[in-house]
Amino acid sequence: MERASTCLSIDYGGPVDRPFEPFPSSALDGSIIDRFDVIAHRFPKRPAIQDLTCCLTYSELADMVDRIAAVTNAAIVERPGPVAILLKNEAHFPAAMLGVLAAGRAYIPLDAGEPIARNRLIAEQAGAAALISAGDIADQARLLFAKEVPIVDLQSLDRLPAMPPKHRPGSDDICYVVYTSGSSGIPKGVYRDHRSLMHDILQFTNTIHLNSDDRIALVFSPSVSAAGRNIFSALLNGGSLHILPPIDLSPVDLGQELRSRCITVLHTYPALFRNIIGTLGPNILLEKMRIVYLSGERINWSDVDEFRRVCSAESFLYVALGSTECQIHIHWFVDERLRATHAQLPVGRQIPDRKVVLTDENGNPVADGEVGELVVASRFIGLGYWNAPELTRQAFTVDALDHTTRIFRTGDLGRRSPDGLLEYIGRKDEQIKLHGRRIHPSEIEDALMALPEVVDAAVVVRSNVDGMPRSLAAFVVLGPNVRGLLPRHLAAMLQKRLPRYLIPWPIFLVDDLPRSPSLKLDRSKLAQLDAIRLGKESADIENPIVAAVTKVFEHVLEVTGATPDDNVASLGGNSLQAVDIAAELERRFGVIVSDETMASSLTIQDLALWIAGQQHR
């Protein structure tokens, strides 16, 4: 095996000296199943997939794929459309994905752990020709799909002969429909062809120099696009895929599995990585880990420090930015020498064959150093949204100069530095105007994550009765060994890093944050959690003075849901309104509230205690 000159533009700064077999560009003219057949024939006895209970060699996997293809073909006779898969996250799931592709159809991966209501929405929108499931989950499947949709139960596979499929998919055939939540909360199905997915595998293989001896961990649900890259990168290169679902394993167990299985490539989101390495002792290393690949959320320099603490000096930290619609389009191997010139860790540079432009609200390119929306143009991004032509026309456009190139506006905001590296600012739809200033909650999350005691953090925006942003609250997950740290301590730490108007309050300490199947932060569930806490706090105001002071704050500031831990700033008030609050408190309680008292940012609870003390003099 040797280096390929075609890799120079994508593996710079990475494992450039590691021998490997470059992914053949000729494979892009075939299908996923064509490439898998080649690999299964070359490595029949090698372990292909290992989950928590079983191991399949490439020969055994190929046999299972043929059986699934045969039973799928029998079920979908004269029924057009893709085939849905609803299984547990174990070895049968990737086998089913390959089996559907071998049958000449596209697959729709569903997460059995998701609410039935969400999977029902997908089932109704997808128009699936059949469904692959097994055991108890098959009973759930019947609740989701119409009675006329046949269900293929994998528990019956052993009674069927292994028959290679007669129909072979082509490179331009659709390979999958993966559903992602839109801004409206309604799932949208992004679909792609074989050529596009193969191109992703080619670039990932040639970037990190994947070998047949690599052991790749899968911690994502197969229902998300990130899982597809991990699954097929392993199985189309002769490596072994190790399925390690976080829902079944604690961070301690995950760390032990990574070490005992000698995992060489780990792709995960930063918060889970922090949790895993936080359980490792001071002298315990992930000795065989050569690539840690972090994506899905903002990454901080403190993550680099933690990575370096548990991985060898020869290991690489790979960072990328992508989306379901256009996959990875920015990446790099983190160069720790750039810490001095980049306060925020960059997400990298554009990937070849994916042109990235930063534009303003009018679609014009912005200058280096200015914030703009990331717009991606490529022949290898998604084809559109399944069964949603109007939505596709709104989101995807065709390059006027090259009709084979599609353009997608990502909704991500970024900034390009003079050295060409891109910094991720946040989501365009999460940008808000608060206290007269335009801010990004991600800026506050970054400041929280920079604290060594914090392993995960998220900020929610609270609105007034008119729906306008009025304050910020934060949810924080502390490290497993942190003791005695209170919300007010975190607020004090933030005051050294952020201006006053960016300090969130209240700050809630929680065990974990809600996440989607792709392991990204689920902000809709976080908002629901905040609403529950807000209601509980309001109901808990029993002290009559606290209740009265709360009503004064809500009346003057024209807000609802104020809590005892709020103050003027946290509720979006200004100095003039603080004077009005002081006057109203003097009128109601007969005490003199000085400017100094109001300027000290006392909470409602503190003011109530102070008023009670004044009244008893």
Image (cartoon, rainbow, N blue to C red):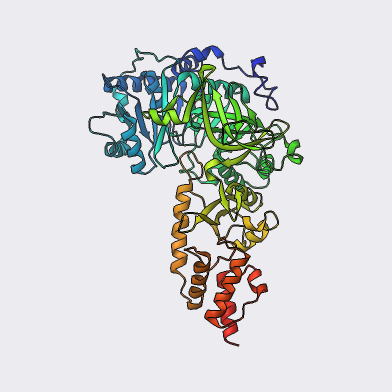
Point out residue 567 in the picture as x, y percentages from the top left corner. 58, 66
The residue that appears at 35% across and 13% down in the rendered structure is 167
The correct choice, above or below, for 83 with respect to 6 in the image is below
Q: Can residue 596 be seen by looking at this rendering? A: yes
The correct choice, above or below, for 425 with respect to 510 in the image is above
Instruction: Report the quarter where the N terminus lies.
Output: top right
Image side of residue 492 versus residue 156, left or right: right
- Out of 49 and 227, give the one closest to the viewer: 227
The answer to which image quadrant residue 64 occupies is: top left
Image side of residue 232 versus residue 96, left or right: right
Point out residue 10 in the picture as x, y percentages from the top left corner. 64, 23
Image side of residue 86 versus residue 31, left or right: left
Residue found at the far bottom of this picture: 617
Point out residue 582 in the picture as x, y percentages from the top left corner. 59, 74
The residue that appears at 35% across and 19% down in the rendered structure is 103
Point out residue 67 in the picture as x, y percentages from the top left corner. 34, 21
The correct choice, above or below, for 613 with respect to 491 in the image is below
Q: How many marks?
A: 0
The residue that appears at 67% across and 45% down in the rendered structure is 302
- Out of 598 and 124, give the one closest to the viewer: 598
- Out of 414 and 524, give the one closest to the viewer: 414
Instruction: Report the quarter where the C terminus lies.
Output: bottom right
